[in-house]
């Protein structure tokens, strides 16, 4: 498994870091077998796995349930688990306990939090001091979608760009080990990447980040209909999967499944009960 220091080294040596989300045993297993560097158990599971229309319904228990399955499928991969909506905003004490529970119960390598408010910075520091590595997340922060007013590109003007850069530096100063940049102009992501010592992982943030992350179901076109501009799909599981299920249905209907090769047989018919 890669360590925090390996990721740091990859940034220094200009080797791209690959990250994908995973939410259950098979997705984690496939990602690890393919050779991914890091897995994110994202709270995007609320949308792609549970069918909610945003991430704000996801709970700490949801995250733990899914992250444990991911860990079983990818024992040798660096796993980051999202702290879900409001689980780190009620009080510092409650936030620490939620992070502790997620970290201890899932055996993950790090937790991830969105934003860089005073309370988030303090939490990053306290978790780091306690031995829980924290990945930060700036730009489009989906847990704040209702405040931001939609899923839009962030940091497009001088003020918001400067704030994002300053937030990134603050997060580094408070101990963050890596920074996800979501939906920011590539030029801004490049400046941030060159200004911080920790690896940046982009999603809709251009090619100059130190690594890239995408959502499992988006890459594979699996259960999702519309893809954001920043996604490149690499397969069409929807199409292949639907065709397979249609074939199964028609085989059952016309009794071409199951065949003898799928069936168990008894050699001695005398052993069968009498139908009387
Ligand atoms: O939840 C998630 O999938 C994420 C990525 C989009 C970075 O936070
Ligand atoms: Na997330």
Image (cartoon, rainbow, N blue to C red):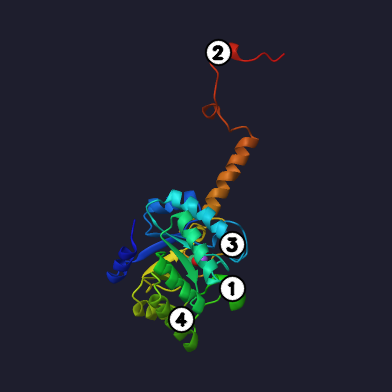
What's the mark number on residue 33? none
Residue 114 vs residue 130, the one in the foreground: 130
Q: CA distance from mark 2 to mark 4?
A: 76 Å
Q: Dot 3 lies on which element?
A: loop
Residue position for label 2: 268
Q: Residues within 10 Å of mark 1 (few under 14, many from 20)?
A: some
Q: Dot 4 lies on which element?
A: helix
**Where's residue 101, x and y in %?**
50, 59
Contact, mark 2 vs mark 1 (Cβ under 8 Å): no
Residue 130, image quadrant: bottom left
Residue drawn 51% across and 28% down?
A: 261
Examine the rendering and report whether any part of residue 157 can be seen.
Answer: no
Residue position for label 4: 164
Q: Residue extending furthest front?
A: 93
**Where's residue 13, x and y in %?**
27, 69
Residue position for label 1: 145
The quadrant of the rendering that contains the N terminus is bottom left
The mark lying in front, picked from 2 and 4, is 4
Q: Is residue 105 left or right of residue 7?
A: right
Q: Residue extending furthest top?
A: 270
The mark lying in front, picked from 4 and 3, is 3
Q: CA distance from mark 1 to mark 3?
A: 14 Å
Q: Residues within 10 Å of mark 4 (few under 14, many from 20)?
A: many
Asked if residue 38 is positioned above or below residue 249 in the image, the reply reads below
């Amino acid at each position: 498994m890669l360590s925090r220091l390996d990721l740091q080294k990859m940034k220094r040596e200009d080797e791209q870091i690959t990250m994908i989300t995973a939410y259950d045993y098979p997705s984690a297993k496939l990602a690890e077998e393919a050779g991914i560097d890091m897995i994110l158990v994202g709270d995007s599971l609320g949308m792609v796995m549970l069918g909610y229309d945003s991430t704000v319904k996801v709970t700490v228990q949801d995250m733990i349930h899914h992250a444990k399955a991911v860990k079983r499928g990818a024992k040798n991969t660096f796993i980051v688990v999202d702290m879900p909506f409001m689980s780190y905003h009620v009080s510092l004490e409650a936030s620490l306990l939620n992070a502790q529970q997620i970290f201890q119960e899932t055996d993950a390598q790090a937790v991830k939090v969105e934003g860089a408010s005073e309370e988030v910075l303090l939490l990053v520091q306290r978790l780091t001091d306690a031995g829980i590595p924290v990945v930060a997340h700036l730009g489009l922060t989906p847990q704040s979608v209702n405040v931001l007013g939609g899923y839009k590109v962030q940091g497009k003007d001088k003020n918001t760009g400067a704030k994002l850069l300053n937030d990134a530096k603050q997060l580094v100063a408070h101990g963050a080990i890596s920074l996800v940049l979501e939906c920011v102009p590539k030029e801004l992501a490049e400046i941030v990447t060159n200004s911080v010592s920790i690896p940046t992982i982009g999603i809709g943030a251009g090619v100059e980040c130190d690594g890239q992350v995408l959502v499992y179901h988006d890459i594979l076109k699996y259960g999702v209909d519309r893809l954001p501009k920043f996604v490149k799909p690499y397969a069409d599981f929807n199409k292949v999967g639907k065709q397979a299920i249609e074939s199964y249905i028609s085989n059952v209907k016309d009794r071409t499944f199951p065949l003898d090769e799928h069936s168990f047989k008894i050699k001695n018919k005398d052993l069968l009960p009498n139908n009387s």
